[in-house]
Amino acid sequence: MKATDTRNATINGRSIDFARNDTILEAARAAGQFIPTLCELADIHHTPGTCRMCIVEVQRPGQDKPQLLTSCDTPLEPGMVIHTRTQAVREHQRLQMELLLADHNQDCASCVRHGDCELQDTAQFVGLQTARFAHPEYFAGRCVDRTSVSIQRDMTKCIRCRRCLAVCRDVQGTDVLVFANKGVHAEIGVRDSIALKDSDCISCGQCTLVCPVGALAEKDDIEQAIDTLYDDDLFTVVQIAPATRIALGEEFNMGFGANVEGKLITALQQLGADVVLDTNFTADLVIMEEGNELLQRLKNGGTTPMFTSCSPGWVNWLEKNHPELIPNLSTVKSPQQCFGAVAKTYLAEKMNVDPKRMRVISIMPCTAKKEEAARPEFLTGGRPDVDVVLTTRECARLLKREGIWLPDLETGSYDNEWMGQYSGAAEIFGTTGGVTEAAIRTLHFAVTGDELQGIDFTPVRGYESMREAEVTLGEMGTVKVGVAHGLAAARTMIDRVLSGDADYQFIEFMGCPGGCMGGGGQPRIKKNYQTFWHERQKAIYRIDSDAKIRQSHNNPCITMIYDEFLGEPLGHKSHELLHTTYRDRKVEVKHDMKTIWDEIRS
Amino acid sequence: MAKVVIGAWDDRVVDNRDKRFFEIEEYPELGDFREFDPGNPIKAFLGGRGFFAFDRNVSLLCAIRDYLKRAAEESCGKCTPCRAGTRILVEKLEQLCETGYKERSIREIRELAEHMQSSSLCGLGQSAAVPLLKLLDAFPEIVEEELSNGCLHSEQPSQSYVTAPCIEECPSKVDVPRYIDYIKDGQFTHSVGVVLQKYPMAATCGRVCVRFCEMACRRTQVDDPVGIKVLKRFVADQQKYATDHWFDRNLIDQPKADDLKVAVIGAGPSGISAAYHLLLKGYRVEVFEAMTEPGGMAAVGIPEYRLPKEEILRKEVAIIEDLGGKIHYNQRMGTHFSLDDLIERGFQSVFLAVGAHQGKSMRVPGEEDAVQGYISGVKFLLFINHYYINLGLDMDLGKKMVVVGGGNVAMDCVRSALRMGVEEVHVVYRRSRNEMPADKEEIEAAEKEGVIFHFLSHPTRVISEDGKVTGIELQKMELASPDQSGRARVIPVAESEHTLATDFIVPAIGQKVDHSFIARDQGLEFNEWGMIKADEQDLSTTRRGVFAGGDAVTGPATLIEAMAQGERGAESIDDYLTHGRTQFRPERRFQKLLKGMRKLQTEEVEQPIRHLYRVQVDELDPETRKRKFEEVEKPITVDAAYQEANRCMRCYRVYSVVTEK
């Protein structure tokens, strides 16, 4: 910044320097002056100016009287005198809040955001004392869409902050959401006015992480989980996904990056789970299958680059956007689905349980896992391999509903000789770059017979949305790998693949930014997006580095399952249980002028 | 003409209640507000900055209630004060009318209205409660009196109109903020749908429009105008299947009787637009086109590098056929058929959109002798766009060319000449660069491609040898004080004649209507400039049932003006065939009212707004593009479109009139 760019203004009597195009809100925050906000989301530079809560009083030089202006989208001007707390400002903020509530469905007690609602927070910040306007008729006609098995939309709660739109459009590049209708009928809609389940939505749930109210949320499956857990006739197996244990603690004030694996095991056992196990076991299994699949493709001239298939958001995206690239997708099921498949065969056999009586519940960082579990490919005899999927957030709600306060519990451990162990390589599935690193550890051993020196393969670690690395695998020579996380990056990566610009043999794709640790089912932190990734990621790598077993192929339970049940990777039984197929799910919407004009005129 | 009884607009309050009507002086900045439609006096007028009452016997609260209702309908629903505030205000007013005047309720209403004014996101919300506030401030006793009379119980005849500066400047009155809103909202189908309500050539207009809208854009007060044209191209290109699949006969709600046939002469922008609207209204339409391809001047006058014909123009024209219209090619009126023939063939009405395709000559010595190397700009473009590109015919253009003129046709000629391989291309223009009527972007593009400009130069002689052009004699000019119309005058500099050697001269100094399409006995008259005489309002010609529009009526103008005339012609023909005469259109009356009070409408941007760069359109590199006809401007990305759309400040305002009936 050049010295001449520095300008000066005052906020609440304090002198502040600013640069061109800096907003009043940015400067106020830098100066430690709090201004209540609602629609704004600094982490994605989102200042749509729709909620009008952040108004301040501004006296511009040369003007005779002060103006009320929104601080989030008004640039500072030299000589501006700003007051954030005048009586007029406070009165207008309160009135604004009353108007916001006028067409908001105030059924708070049943709301999914109860106790965690940014609208309520803001009402408190502005000192709301009464809400004079309640007009249920204003929101009566708005859309409530419960068609998706992953995400539910209740537009009677929507306050039009457009954060979901920004995330879907700019962060994910999926661009499925639109702003529909006018006036009090205005709401966030789905492109081409179709049901969410039929749309291009890939169920990543990133929108649910930023919704300040209860308008967008994961579909709540807690009732089904309780039904299953409390049914004495059923044998319930619960699996815990890698990224959930390092985030769940946030819901119990345990700080960021706390590993609550042991306490969660205890909690689930208390709730009546017959066996609590780790998705990490099947993550190890996936590495064995996927690693061998890659080697086979490379040896036999199969389709490369091979794409990972663990992230259902990503798989949905590919099926809906580039079905022609389905041959590049690894045929290995995700760890969640491998778990369901082996639990209801191998584990049932070993534990002598009738598979028909067995139910699998997953605790996942992911909303798309709900849709994945419901895929027709993953039904056996009409029953899903995974019966109930709870996101990390639902898991927290379940525990709270059951009167369990996680920090109070003893630390438990897995106790199962067949599926009770996992490697550090499996745990890092929870972060971007992790699947690749885990695969390289095992591939190196598979090809050369030696462990990768130093174990860690750090070139694929990091936060950049696209990364690449090379690894030498003995006689096979150099293998080039790529990593992309978040679907905007995935799209760019795919464009590079299609243009021939990406000469990789293997690409790890994660639907959510950050991978599973940033999953759409993870705890949401008010007014924040992706802020605490670093803590979550550090915790994941800590679990890996502290693990006794660091490579999937060294997991004794993995050796056992191949010896006693599966035979060999890519063998007949593996194919039957651990591999799958994909479908062209491109959404074609036929438009006609008549409908469009009718909607425009309405 | 407006005698204001009471009024409050901006800071000015008028109160003539103590005067008798004849004593009231006319309000100078208002135009003619006597009647809305004939025999229907205007009793009050409301806008975003206040109100005027022209009659004592009017309920202003009722007018304000109706005004707020319209604002509530137009509210985009993004910000709360406007979305909820407009409705709650209406309800509060109605409640108050039930209970009678109450100080507390008035306070609450004022609080809400002030909140809307000070904290709405866009001008619509900020202005929606202004008439109410003005009334409360200036005439509280009227509020009290009206409330005690139960004023809101009865309906009061009124009309409202919602517009924005960009809409008013557009000849076709395209709802620009709406289609930009739909882009912001992610609804590209609806965005292009808004444009298609006006004309079928959305992608064409998105490429070649001269952008009256952008000149009116209030964003100019902040940084640069919104890229309205490029956004139109974006949505039209995005929804490219619109032209293939969206249109069919099902779109026509009420087909008219089979014998109600309309003939449209000319498949140019005006004719196509007329045919489109007539078809949508349910008429059977046949278009007669003299050329073997559609598009008129858009096809033969606009070069391929600005408008790809096969991919864009022809597909958009094909909508006419999707809607059941017929286009007969190679059917030149005056050669293959006459106006009388059409009537005999059962066409009840005819729309003449024959264009202005005859180039004007320079009227300098030597013109007659130049047989080779001398053709008009329109002919030159016709040759390149039609005979060269479509049919592959070649022509010797020499190495050096001089184009005379400073308009868009001249720019199209010079840039096309480069692409035809002419090595050195000159422009000769009699005024200076500032006076050039051509689109600034076109001038810059020509400069980048290496065209040499000679300003303040005027041709005085065409020099040729054995009928072949060898040079042009030019005279230096100098600028003098502007003439009455405000246009800069130029006067010749004595003894400044000099010669510029050239192989080819293209005068691009205007076009006129070629009269060979009609014989004298067909009842059609022309004005003193040779254009078809047509009524300014309804485009009716001197022959009953025959209407005319486009360049043939206006003289050489723009695509958007021609398309606007086509729509207007279709409305008039519909009126004629349905009612026998032209009907009153409230929106046109509003447009005229607003034009008449322009001074009261101009609005400063009163809030600091963040600077946002206007979208940059990628172009082919001048060095590579200047030798080929490939489209120069590249499409913008979806992200860029969202960003550009977000620059729109949505300057909608509601206007309403209370009328006698």
Image (cartoon, rainbow, N blue to C red):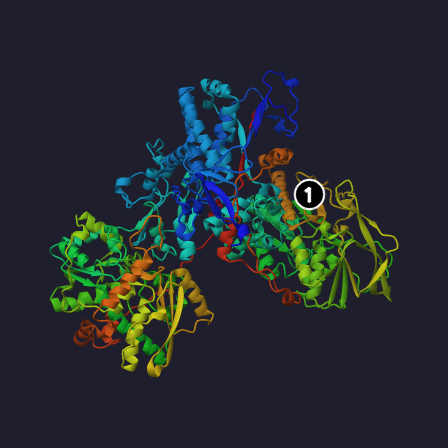
Q: Is residue A537 left or right of residue B468?
A: left
In the image, B642 versus A266, the foreground residue is: A266
In the image, A378 versus A187, the foreground residue is: A187
Q: Is residue A500 above or below residue A412?
A: below
| Letter of the chain that mark 1 sits on in the rendering | B
Q: Is residue B157 above or below residue B510?
A: above
Q: Quadrant of residue A124?
A: top left
Q: What residue is drawn where x is 48% and y is 20%?
A: B146
Q: Picture coordinates of residue A505 (x, y %)?
A: 38, 74
Q: Is residue B622 above or below residue A504?
A: above
Circle 1 is placed at which residue position?
A: B546
Q: Picture coordinates of residue A335 (x, y %)?
A: 26, 66
Q: Is residue B144 left or right of residue B502?
A: left
Q: What residue is drawn where x is 31% and y is 65%?
A: A310
In the image, B561 versus B619, the foreground residue is: B619
Q: Quadrant of residue A490?
A: bottom left
Q: Is residue A331 visible?
A: no
